[in-house]
Image: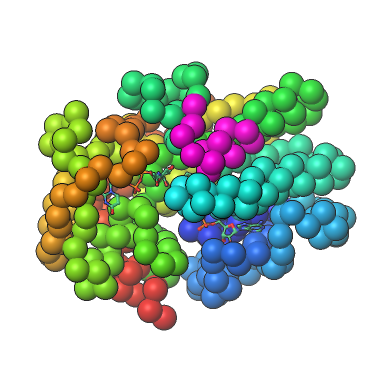
Amino acid sequence: MILVTGGLGYIGSHTVVELLKSEEVLILDNLYNSEKKVLNRIDQITGKDPVFIEGDIRDEKLLDQIFTRYNIESVIHFAGLKAVGESVEVPLRYYDHNVNGTLTLLKAMAKHKVFNLVFSSSATVYGDKNPVPFHEEMPLSTTNPYGTTKRMIEEMLGDLSRSDEKWRIMILRYFNPVGAHSSGLIGESPKGIPNNLMPFICQVAKGERPKLNIFGNDYNTPDGTGVRDYIHVVDLARGHVLALEYLLKNIGLEIVNLGTGRGYSVLEMVKTFEKVNQISIPFEVVNRRSGDIASCYASTDKAKVILKFDAHKNLEDMCADAWYYMNLGENQ
Ligand code: NAD
Ligand code: UD1
């Protein structure tokens, strides 16, 4: 059985859908940023019923009970907080959920001799000094507490793997996950005003916000707006299944980027969304957002070689599926 922490969240729920094709799954989620109805949606899509435990990864006793009661073979660890701006305002909350939460989970895994782990890291650890494309050996730096929690956890996992060769760890550095399951039943539902581009565009399309603010058009990019490596969340979810397969055959720690290797600008994203969904997105160019970099996209060589991973879905699919979910899944 696979323990999926944060399995009712955006990326976790899509990964659970992929995993349920061949595995039994136990989801541990405290519903901090997700809803229980996602469980029914997973059931509707897959016809399967994963075990769900509402609880916190920082709860040592609960983890002890889970590892004692269930035959857990591997852990995919998504649980954590991810809002960059909020992490600047309340850093200790981020160090607590992300770093302390992961530490508590790792201690429970060690105690119960579960040594297989896939961890959600982020392209944010490449910082603002490296040239694109970002490859896994580049030096890391971070510009906000959220990113620093990911960097600290990566270091912790490195030390752990060097301390005992029984650990099999895969650190996945995600680029920009967008889109939704093609059923329209699960997707991204940010609470409050979205920070990220695609959810914001969807809310403008729906008339919930009057316009999109484009943060700067004077970057050193083809059209001056920021370039990012958007990856469809279902492709990302498949990457986790491949990562798990790899782990079971190989010892040690690996770090792998999950992106498409291709960057799109904010304007390209807006134009594609408009074309695919036949809807207009009013926008205004405003000042740059502090902390943003001009371009961010992945070197995908390692993912291709060791995971045999390739993204299948394109920007049109990402825009169509995000909008379909916004109209169907979010309202049910
Ligand atoms: P999400 O917020 O949708 O999912 C995280 C889930 O973890 C939520 O369901 C939340 O309720 C749960 N959770 C939070 N703290 C918990 C705790 N202490 N105990 C138990 N459950 C807890 O986020 P997501 O977009 O699915 O991201 C999943 C992981 O991937 C996160 O670690 C995030 O930092 C990382 N990541 C996300 C992105 C992105 O753009 N979405 C990019 C890079 C990395
Ligand atoms: C954000 C996070 C980053 C995280 C990544 C993936 C910040 C500062 N960074 O980065 O840590 O790893 O998400 O989840 O939040 N844009 C607009 N208008 C908007 C929103 C975004 O023009 O309303 C632009 C941004 O300037 C950027 C692009 O769209 O050029 C993508 O933005 P976003 O979706 O927030 O992702 P990242 O900036 O890559």
- Percent x, y of residue 266: 21, 45
Q: Is residue 53 left or right of residue 89?
A: right
Q: Is residue 193 visible?
A: yes
Residue at the (67%, 26%) spot, across then down? 158
- Quarter of the C terminus within the rendering: bottom left
The figure's colour scheme reads: rainbow
Would you say residue 152 sits in the magenta stretch? Answer: yes
Q: Nearer the viewer, residue 241 or 229?
A: 229
User: Can you name the residue that lies furthest to the bottom here?
Assistant: 332
Q: How many marks?
A: 0
- Percent x, y of residue 275: 12, 57
Residue at the (41%, 39%) spot, across then down? 175
- Percent x, y of residue 45: 48, 68
Residue at the (82%, 46%) spot, across then down? 108
Q: Is residue 196 left or right of residue 158?
A: left
Would you say residue 330 sits in the magenta stretch? Answer: no
Q: Is residue 229 left or right of residue 63?
A: left
Q: Is residue 25 left or right of residue 43?
A: right
Q: Nearer the viewer, residue 303 or 174?
A: 174
Q: What's drawn in magenta, residue-wise?
A: 141-153
